[in-house]
């Protein structure tokens, strides 16, 4: 199966050099299209972005979930992926997430920073890690999907599954990931 892959990168006040390099790496390794959803950019940010295939500019801050949703709804590809603008998920790991969808024939796949084999180069603050652990624990208690990390910035979904899930998604912020996984 030869599937086309589109990657959405939601961005608000991104480090432009990092975002350009990441978009270029994704395009060279896995993506047919790299699309950036950019909220409230400065003129200098907009002028300096060169690597994405397409950029949509929002004049207000929408939240991560709203940006990803808007991007997914523009991609004409078979597989829809999102990755965080800071490049915290290496392109090799994005490739692994996409491979799970293509090779394992699943509708949705997600990365995990809490997987025992995950390599963490830059850790979050202790408070943020504890809050994330507590959030993941609570989600495991409440949701049928039992994961270690619901909010990793690497997820892939088939376009068909997205068409089914999208009408049921209402979250526009940080809990978008959990809603996507719970509905899927």
Image (cartoon, grey):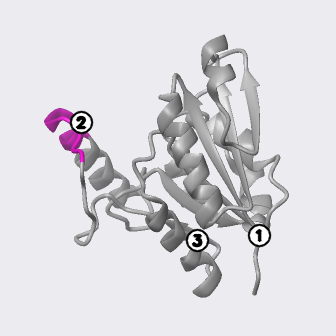
Q: Nearer the viewer, residue 159 or 117?
A: 117
- Within 10 angstroms of label 1, few (less than 14), some, or many (20 or more) residues? some
Instruction: Please give the range of residues in magenta.
Output: 122-131
- Numbered mark located on residue 98 in the image: 3
Height in image: 49 above or below 158?
above
Q: Helix, strand, or loop for circle 2?
A: helix
Q: Helix, strand, or loop for circle 3?
A: helix
- Numbered mark located on residue 128 in the image: 2
| Quadrant location, the N terminus | bottom right
| Quadrant location, the C terminus | bottom right
Mark 2 → mark 3, Cα distance in angstroms: 28 Å
- Within 10 angstroms of label 3, few (less than 14), some, or many (20 or more) residues? many
State which mark lies toward you, 2 or 3. 3
Residue 180 visible at all:
no
Quadrant in the rendering for residue 109:
bottom right
Verify CB contact (< 8 Å) between mark 1 and mark 2.
no
Q: What residue is drawn where x is 31% and y is 46%?
A: 135
State which mark lies toward you, 1 or 2. 1
Q: What residue is drawn where x is 52% and y is 47%?
A: 22
């Amino acid at each position: 199966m030869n599937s086309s892959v589109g990657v959405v990168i939601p961005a608000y006040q991104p480090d432009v050099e990092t975002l350009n390099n990441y978009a270029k790496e994704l395009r060279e390794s896995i993506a047919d299209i790299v699309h950036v959803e950019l909220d409230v950019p400065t003129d200098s940010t907009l002028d300096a972005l060169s690597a994405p295939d397409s950029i949509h500019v929002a004049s207000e801050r929408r939240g991560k979930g709203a940006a990803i949703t808007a991007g997914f709804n523009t991609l004409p590809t078979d597989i829809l992926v999102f990755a965080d603008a800071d490049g915290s998920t290496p392109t090799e790991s994005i490739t692994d997430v996409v491979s799970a969808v293509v090779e394992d024939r699943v509708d949705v796949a997600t990365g995990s920073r809490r997987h025992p084999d995950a390599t963490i180069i830059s850790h979050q603050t202790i408070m943020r890690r504890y809050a994330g652990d507590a959030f993941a624990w609570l989600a495991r208690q409440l949701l049928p999907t039992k994961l270690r990390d619901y909010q990793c910035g690497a997820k892939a979904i088939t376009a068909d599954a997205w068409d089914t899930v999208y009408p049921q998604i209402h979250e526009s912020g940080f809990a978008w990931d959990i809603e996507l996984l719970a509905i899927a």
